[in-house]
Amino acid sequence: MEEIKRAAAPHAMLFPFPCSGHINPTLKLGELLHSRGVRVTFVNTEHNHERLLRRSALRGREGFRFESVPDGLENADRRAPDKTVRLYLSLRRSCRAPLVALARRLVPRVTCVVLSGLVSFALGVAEELAVPSFVLWGTSACGFLCTLRLRQLRQRGYTPLKDESYLTNGYLDTPIDWITGMPPVRLGDISSFVRTVDPTSFALRVEEEEANSCAKAQGLILNTFDELEPDVLDALRDEFPRVYTIGPLAAAMHLRVNPGPSAGLSLWEEDASCMAWLDARQAGSVLYVSFGSLAVLSLSQLAEFAWGLAGTQRPFLWVVRPGLVAGDRGMEALPSDFLEETENRRLIVEWCAQEQVLRHPAVGGFLTHSGWNSTTESIWAGVPMVCAPGFADQYINSRYVCGEEEWGIGLRLDEQLRREQVAAHVEELMGEGSKKGEEMKRNAAKWKARAEAATAPGGSAHENLERLFEVLRLDEESDAEHGRR
Ligand code: UDP
């Protein structure tokens, strides 16, 4: 029966940029598509594929398979400080032909290509195959809009910065009040990419180009929901006729996919001891700390966070993945006196099942880098945040998280990290009797309920996902009519 149903089903080839922040949401989308009868081929790079195979983390099944293509990198590139840039360039240079060849080998034929951000070169793959393409841009809608507007910021002369002094002389506080769909924000809130003096800044151009390329796709898929970012989405829908807001993906998965397959292709081993440790803690007492899969802290930033955490006197669970600390270091870089001082009230792990951790009743706050996946997972879990943004859209995400007129569920740390402020913000967020803390908790509960309602049957994200399924089916049917099967 399964085989008969899928024989006539659309077949989506999914290809995310090869890092956790892109793989995880793309995989969730794949699971959701599969749950509605779409065939899914999920393509990793060979490097990640082998890494996942070693840990038996790949579980293909009927209608859902994993494939891989080479990323073209030399081993030395993988440890280079600019490894992500190298990966980006290498994929662009060498990956199109293997993807086309792979798609042509697949049976039944691929009927659409779904990409994450940063792999816009693969829009050409869909063109070559003559199938529609969709981009799951992994940031918030406000993050996407800001990235689109990097071009206007440059044209209006806001960027690049005149010289290094503009990083600290207050220039980044310049109000930007002309982006339709957004409240007035500071220039520095827009993105990390405005922090450059280089007129040819690679990151700035790449982001600009990648976001603007989405216009070439048949549909833009966002891991957000209409009630969370209504004005931004109205503005985006004027430019992009097909926008599918289907988030939070974590919530949609939870509701619709049964029995829970892997929530993410974790590139690191999840430490299972966290849950038992959390079970032994009081409700709402634990601060969860994680800076995602890519952030790299300097030794001095690490020390400010560590001593800030020590200063709170609260229990905390801190993810210190290998490579979090500059020089490709991890836990071993933590100061030993900090470890001694906090011994009885902390757990430090390399990686954890973050969604489960955030939804554990013991967790009452999240010190985060404000990556979009982490932010949506926290919203869905109803956990307020202390934000320490450092890269790309993390700045605008934290602006919305902390804005009292926007979501009102967090406090932001200054760019110049200070341990006293880390401790003070955590206390304000989680401490008993903090008026602001109580308000943030109330708001977090409100947004949690809205996220759940959006992804439940009849909710906006649920209905948009249905529309997406429908479009995939229609595209497939019209293909079949034109004899392109
Ligand atoms: N994550 C996880 N375990 C950890 C830390 C992070 O599973 O110990 C996941 C997290 O749930 C999220 C992703 O890694 O889905 C990080 O994505 P995000 O967009 O927040 O940040 P990025 O890694 O792209 O900077």
Image (cartoon, helix red, strand yellow):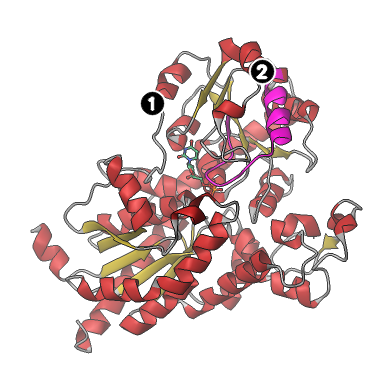
- Crowdedness near tag 1: few (<14), some (14–19) or many (≥20) residues, C-alpha within 10 Å: few
Q: Earlier in the sequence, mark 1 or mark 2?
A: 1
Please state which amino acid type lies under the numbered disc 2. Answer: Phe
Callout 1 touching callout 2 (CB < 8 Å): no
Q: Residue at x 58, y 56 (%)?
A: 140
- Seen in the picture, residue 23 relative to 434 is either above or below; the reply is below
- The location of residue 47, given as percent across then percent down, is 37, 54
Where's the C terminus, which quadrant? bottom left
Q: Residue at x 36, y 47 (%)?
A: 253
Q: Which residues are magenta?
A: 288-310
Please state which amino acid type lies under the numbered disc 1. Answer: Ala
Instruction: Report which quarter residue 171 is drawn in.
Output: bottom right
Image disc number at residue 338: 2
Looking at the rendered structure, the secondary structure element under dot 2 is helix
The residue closer to the viewer here, 404 or 55, is 55
- The location of residue 290, given as percent across then percent down, is 57, 35
Residue at the disc numbered 1: 272
Where's the N terminus, which quadrant? bottom left
The residue closer to the viewer here, 88 or 29, is 88
- Crowdedness near tag 2: few (<14), some (14–19) or many (≥20) residues, C-alpha within 10 Å: some
- The location of residue 314, given as percent across then percent down, is 64, 17
